[in-house]
Image (cartoon, rainbow, N blue to C red):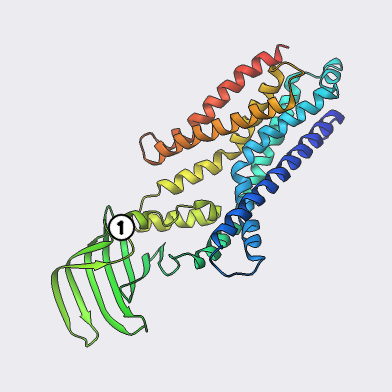
Amino acid sequence: MILKTYQKYLIKEFLFFTLKVTFIFFILGFIMGILEELRFFSDIEVEYYFPIILVFLNLPSLIYQIFPFIILISIIFLFLNLTEKGELTSFKNHGLENFQIIKLIASVTFLIGLFTIVIFYNFASILKFNYLDIKKDYTKDAKYLASITENGIWIKDEIDENILFINAKKIEFDNLIDVEIVKLSQDFEYLSTVTAQKVNIKNNLWNINEAITLNKNNTQKTEKNILINTNFNYEKISNLYSDLSSITLWGLIKLKEDYQTVNYSTIEIDYQFQKIISYPIYLTIMSLLSIVMMMNLKSGLNRVFLITIGIFLSVLIYYINHFFGIIGRSETIPLLLSIWIPLLILLIISMVGLIKINEK
């Protein structure tokens, strides 16, 4: 496709302001991130450059999350620049309709969204995973590990001067099913193995009925009811992958398969998938909303006032999405509706504004 001169110009200007605003948010994110990391490592001795590396690992994920608002603010700057130079009037005088400008910017935004979820999201998630993986070694929970694989749920726990290795085939409500618990000393000396059909994990004090215990002297006994103290409960296990932004698209697919294998809820993964799928459309709607605002507002308004409106809209949209996300993940409303209702509302608002614009 051969682009016309005005199209090349508008695309170049749009990308320029997008990169410029992204860079500004990158610097702001770096400053806030370095302050947070310095606070975190205030009592931990590390090399001076270590917090800086962590900040750079986390920043791409942050940019991905706020990029819809970067698009909104970038378009505000774009139209301010076009208006101040009189280029919008010039375009109109040469027969260029508002709809053609809107269509061009919306199309470019959609393509940026596709690039973001196919390339940038996976790049950011890999860096985020490394960020979390490095940082967990400096938290008090570093010795408490848990994961879900196709072979079930695996937990390593250290408590009461013992090390526990726990494997369960699946999870049902507050219970682990087909459980094996191997207990070792701090010197990794074998102490015992407990097997059971069902273990209640509602609290940190696990309740086991009909447990079979094999001791280190190779004697076996069956116990009706025993209690095992751990650092884990159902809620903590449920939050194993609370930050799904650290998992790539193909990682999410694999994780969902593993969750289904152990009969574990995939609601969080499905929510993350829907957010990723809807991302290009979300960016496009944000661009339309920004264009509608700029073309319907009176010219000559203060630049600071317009940026303030953009920031206010960004915060408002964020909290609307967050609210619908909470009620969607809690299954108060269907998950699909929790993702698409806010976008549909924004699209309707944008379309009403677009009708007025094309009449000008």
Locate residue 280: give its quadrant.
top right
Locate residue 305: give its quadrant.
top right
Residue beneath the point at 72% across and 25% down = 102
Q: Report the residue marked by disc 1.
A: 171
Q: Residues within 10 Å of mark 1 (few under 14, many from 20)?
A: many
Residue 176's place in the image compared with 1, above or below, is below
Residue 187's place in the image compared with 22, above or below, is below
Q: In this figure, what is the number of numbered marks? A: 1
Nearest the eye: 332 or 302: 302
Nearest the eye: 31 or 134: 31
Residue beneath the point at 82% across and 17% down = 92
Residue 181's place in the image compared with 153, above or below, is below
Q: Is residue 280 left or right of residue 273?
A: right
Q: In this view, does 329 lie to the left or right of 98?
A: left
Q: Can residue 137 be seen in this view?
A: yes
Residue 313's place in the image compared with 195, above or below, is above
Nearest the eye: 226 or 351: 226
Q: Is residue 3 visible?
A: no
Q: Quadrant of the N terminus?
A: top right
Q: Position of residue 307 (x, y in %)?
A: 69, 29
Furthest-bottom residue in view? 217
Label 1 residue SS: strand
Q: Quadrant of the C terminus?
A: top right
Residue beneath the point at 52% across and 41% down = 275
Residue beneath the point at 70% across and 22% down = 294
Nearest the eye: 35 or 135: 35
Q: Where is residue 343 in the image (x, y as percent from the top left)?
A: 54, 30
Locate residue 22: give its quadrant.
top right
Q: Position of residue 11 (x, y in %)?
A: 79, 35
Q: Where is residue 158 in the image (x, y as percent from the top left)?
A: 36, 72
Q: What residue type is labelled 1?
A: Ile
